[in-house]
Image (cartoon, helix red, strand yellow):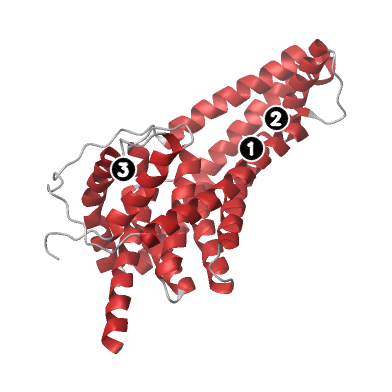
Amino acid sequence: MAIIAATKDEKNKSIIDKLTALWALNESGLGGFLHVFNSPFTGLIVGGVSILLISLIAFYAKNKWQTILKALVIVLIIKMAVSPYSPFGAYVAVSFQALFGAFLFSNFSWKGFVLLVLGMVTFLESALQKLIVLTVVYGTGLWEAINIYGSWVQKKLDFVSETSTTSFLVTLYLAVYGVCGLLAGVFIKSIIKIIASKPEVDFYLETMPKASESTKRKVPFKTKVIWVWLITVAIIVLGFSIFGGALFGWQKAIYIVFRSFLILMLWYLVIGPFLLRLVQKYLSKKESKYQQDITNAMDLFPYFRQIISYTWKQTEHLKGFNRFKFFMANSISNCIHFKTPTE
């Protein structure tokens, strides 16, 4: 009995190590699920896959809190190594998902309700983080501009509502994220059921991955920030100068432009790099402790990318959501039962 228990513990440890590597691959942007199907909802998919992998780590772990925290540190160190210019907010989002997941799985029985709460809360945290950033950068001027547009549209439609446009849009935005989080929880439960029901058979690749694999070039994060800032500023300026009337006018629009520019410069040149250095300093201290785990995880990346591409082709006979569900379940199952040529 002791030998059987020891064998099962070793097998679960191997599965957790591979799930950690898959989580790191998902977060580092070096390939994986997002390279198979292009989607405008990148953030939602990355977040959903992350909480799926965190849930699976908890499923196979005895000490759920300690195991998830160790996996989190390894993932963040790999993220720091391969994506050194990732914004501080990205580290906050990943850490919140892991810490909240570790708290839930450590204190409550492993049931579907916990997955629903994890999905909804982590998705809402992501949405609230974006709203807080917008408010800090643009102040209340952004919401005033949106209300101006809303009033103009209501006049054109001869429709009057006591609810402000901002309140309606923010509520709708949070509701969409909350519902998506609940759906993610239901989806994760179904994926785990499929994986748990599969026979634990070793998976081997017929062909070795190439030494250098081409990855799609990503648009730099700062370029995205500049474009978002330009579009948002244009909306605010047009709102105040054209539709705002004498009460607002272009003077306030110019003030918001300069204010947002200075805040962004302060964040990206001073505050952001300072906080990022603190995170990197902490992770660097942990790196030597987990060096072997980090090396093993990164060595699996080329294999996992090939497994994911292989599984996508293997599910081409399925259509729509059914294909997506079994592709995710089979990809993860193949990855966690994968054996390298040396094993």
Asked if the residue at tag 2 contacts the one at tag 1, i.e. Cβ–Cβ closer than 8 Å, the answer is yes
Closest to the observer, 267 or 296: 296
Q: Is the magenta stretch mostly helix, strand or loop?
A: loop
Residue 242, placed above or below residue 284: above
In space, the residues marked 3 and 2 are separated at their CA atoms by 36 Å
Q: Quadrant of the N terminus?
A: bottom left
Residue 336, placed above or below residue 8: above
Of mark 1 and mark 2, the one earlier in the sequence is: 1
Residue 320 in view of the camera: yes
The boundaries of the magenta stretch are 28-32
The answer to which image quadrant residue 169 occupies is top right
For residue 31, the mark is: 3
Q: What residue type is labelled 3?
A: Gly
For residue 142, the mark is: 2
In space, the residues marked 1 and 2 are separated at their CA atoms by 8 Å
Question: Residue 293, position in %: x, y?
Answer: 28, 66
| Residue occupied by mark 1 | 134
Q: Quadrant of the C terminus?
A: bottom left
Closest to the observer, 17 or 150: 17
Q: Residue at x 32, y 82 (%)?
A: 5
Asked if the residue at tag 3 contacts the one at tag 1, i.e. Cβ–Cβ closer than 8 Å, the answer is no
Q: What residue type is labelled 2?
A: Leu
Residue 305 colored in magenta in the image: no
Dot 2 surroundings within 10 Å: few (below 14), some, or many (20 or more)?
A: many
